[in-house]
Amino acid sequence: MNLRIIGALISKDFSLFFRNRFFALMTVFALITYLTIYFVMPSSVDESLKIGLYAPVMPPVFEQLQEESLEIEVVESDEALREAVTEGQYVAGVALPADIMERFMLGQKPQITLYFASDTPEELKDAVVVLIRELAYLQTGQPLAIEMSEEILGPDMLGMQIPPRDRLRPLLVFFILIIETMGLATLIGEEVGRRTIQALLVTPMTVKDLFAAKGIMGISLAFGQAALFMAIVGGISGQPLVILAALLLGAVLVTGIGFLIGSVAKDMMSAMPWFLVALIPLLIPTVSVMFPGLITGWVKVIPSYYLVDTLHRAANFGAGWGDVWQSLLMLLGFNVVIVWIGITALRRKFR
Amino acid sequence: MSLKRVGILLGKDFLQGPKNYIFVMAVVLPVVISLVISLVFGTLFSEKPKLGVMDEGSSQLVTMIRELPSVVTKEYGTVSEIKQAVESGAVDMGIVLPEDFDNSVIQGEETQITAYIWGESLAKDRTILGVTIANLVRELAGQEAPVEIEAITLGDEVSIPWNDRLLPLIVLMAVFLGGLLLPATSVVNEKENKTLEALVITPTTIGDVFVAKGLLGIILSLFAGIVILILNQAFGAQPMLLVLVLALGAIMAAEIGLLLGALLKDWTTLFTVWKLGGILLFAPAIVYLFPQIPEWVAKVFPTYYVIQPIIEISQRGAGWPDIAVNVLILAALDLVLIAVVILALKRTKQYAV
């Protein structure tokens, strides 16, 4: 392998890329767009039910109610409560009658009025009804004959939930990486189609030099953009080395796939369907991060699982080398196989 | 311009189209995405808390939980299964009901329920599930609720389920994937293969070629849009009005496609533009997904004026007076785009005739 030739090829590919101001500008714009999507997404999770309460007489059970999941705000009048609910300040408004305690003591059923905004989901309405009923049971001293022993499985994220935009982060990074697959596949496909690769191979450049140059070019572009994105969105502040290692392996993965698609594509048009064939299954693991519990163990047969899982755990839970080494090793294994298949397929095409 | 020549060119594109990947993708992909989103993602975005139940006996409580409209219920056969489901986040809480649970509750004996809670479940979901279980146990025990509750709904806003929120995205994809990409790729392809130059040497004008390519995009785009609305049962009470809006949207898509075709010289550049432009085109649908984002953000993007009337008609039963302003803006945008396409064609000296 000749490093001088590889260097010359890489610098040629890069200078071609950046000489085209349009390409360079569009790549920057695309990155800005992904960043905008990230920053537009909610940055926090509202874990609590905000309820307005109008209570001429405050029952002790309502007064003592201080849970992390409930934010009860007392309002001064029924009218104010209705207004606040209509304006969406509360998911529900609870209006207690003035004689609530007397009725409880007489064993009668007081009537509690609940106000909901019309766009409150039905499940939330039902939940508030159930909640108020339970409070009434507690107020009237009716004990529950069961004891619930609770066990939290996994890290308890109460009060420090992962915001939607951070759950979306692995998906956006994966998109940044995978899009480069398409560019690389097209570049290779076109060079094969125009026979410029065969022309290059007539020179002292070997097939190994060519793959090394294209590989480094693809990896640098994919890794550079993904790393920059993660740095801007604060994704590498916790475990920088783990994240960068995962991104590098991810860039190798997409480069290998780029080789593979480049071996069957003649141009961008013919690369597109193969790109989609690769993209759809590779995207599935990102769904499992955004919607935990949806996908079962079979997702582990998809190479990108080990990338998004590592990114998710390292960036959102601060997982270190000890927690993710197995995933990184699996990703490395997949990379070796995919890059080898890609190179073999391309070599056959050159012949 | 010769209508006959436009017809011949259009016929050729329709005949050759199915051999083109983009043609197939433009028709098939929105349908596949629509089916996937409607069948899978529609239920994923549910905000209901999820409760897992494992019954070691045959408790009535399981049936009562199953009938709850406010909770998504899943049943498991073993403790390890339910623990695995909780750990993975498949359910927010998993409860294990001991044998003879019902009798113990009815007789008022102290009974223990084991509850596994997913660490990432929201505080409000934990509370809702906790009080729901408590309420059902009281019901099972025959306890009478000590209050009467009257629920009053205020205002006239309607809650939008996720299935409906996703509809604009699917419709935009259907209309713009084919409507924009087909004319754009078709023109760029002809440029790359030098067949466009060959065509304009014949009596066919560059205008004939562009009109034929534009019509191809409009027809396919309109077809895909109608299919998606039928698949999603979103045709509403004003089908003709909906078709009119879809047609104006299809025209916009084709015009943008032709503009890209006129300005860009190769596939690679087109793809790069799509990388950015695609996101901008779909931005109003993304804004619609998140009601927290103010609506004015969506109004900045031209596709807002396609999607807003469609939502109004299909989801809110709107008629012409409600959507007239947006439809007129859409029509005006179409006219402006036609002028821009003509200008771009005139400036492209290479093909000017």
Image (spheres, grey):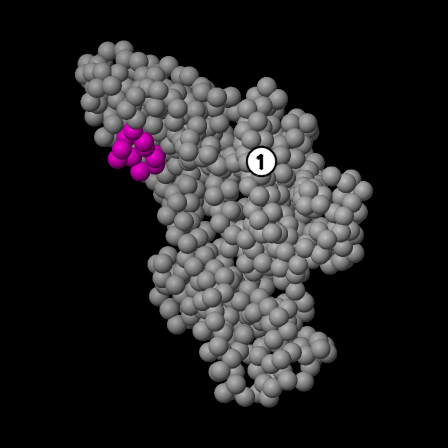
Q: Position of residue A51 (x, y in %)?
A: 46, 34
Q: Write down the quadrant of residue A168 in the picture.
A: top right
The reply to whether residue B259 is visible in this rendering is no
Question: Pointer 1: what residue?
Answer: A335
Residue reaching furthest to the top: B110
Q: Is residue B222 left or right of residue B138?
A: right
Q: Nearer the viewer, residue A274 or B265?
A: A274
Please tell me which residue lies in front, A82 or B202.
B202
Q: Residue at x 52, y 52 (%)?
A: A274
* Residue at the spot 23% in from the left edge and 30% down from the top edge: B63
Q: Measured along the vertical axis of the image, is residue B262 above or below residue A203?
A: below
User: Foreground residue, B249 or B203?
Assistant: B203
Boundaries of the magenta span: B65-75
Q: Residues within 10 Å of mark 1 (few under 14, many from 20)?
A: many
Dot 1: element: helix
In the image, residue A21 lies at what x, y percent? 76, 57
Residue A50 percent location from the top left of the image: 48, 34
Q: Kindly indicate the quadrant of the structure image that contains residue B146.
A: top left
Relative to B293, is A101 on the left or the right? left
Q: Quadrant of the N terminus of chain A?
A: top right
For badge 1, the amino acid type reads Asn
The answer to if B292 sits in the magenta stretch is no
Q: Quadrant of residue B141?
A: top left
What residue is drawn where x is 66% and y is 59%? A195
Residue B69 makes an appearance in the image: yes
Up/down of A327 relative to B214, above or below: above
Q: Count all numbered tags in the image, as a single digit.
A: 1
Residue drawn at the location 64% of the way across and 52% of the way down: A188
Coordinates of residue B344 in the picture (x, y in percent): 68, 75
Report whether A215 appears left or right of B158. Answer: right
- In front: A282, or A122? A282
Say which chain tag 1 marks.
A
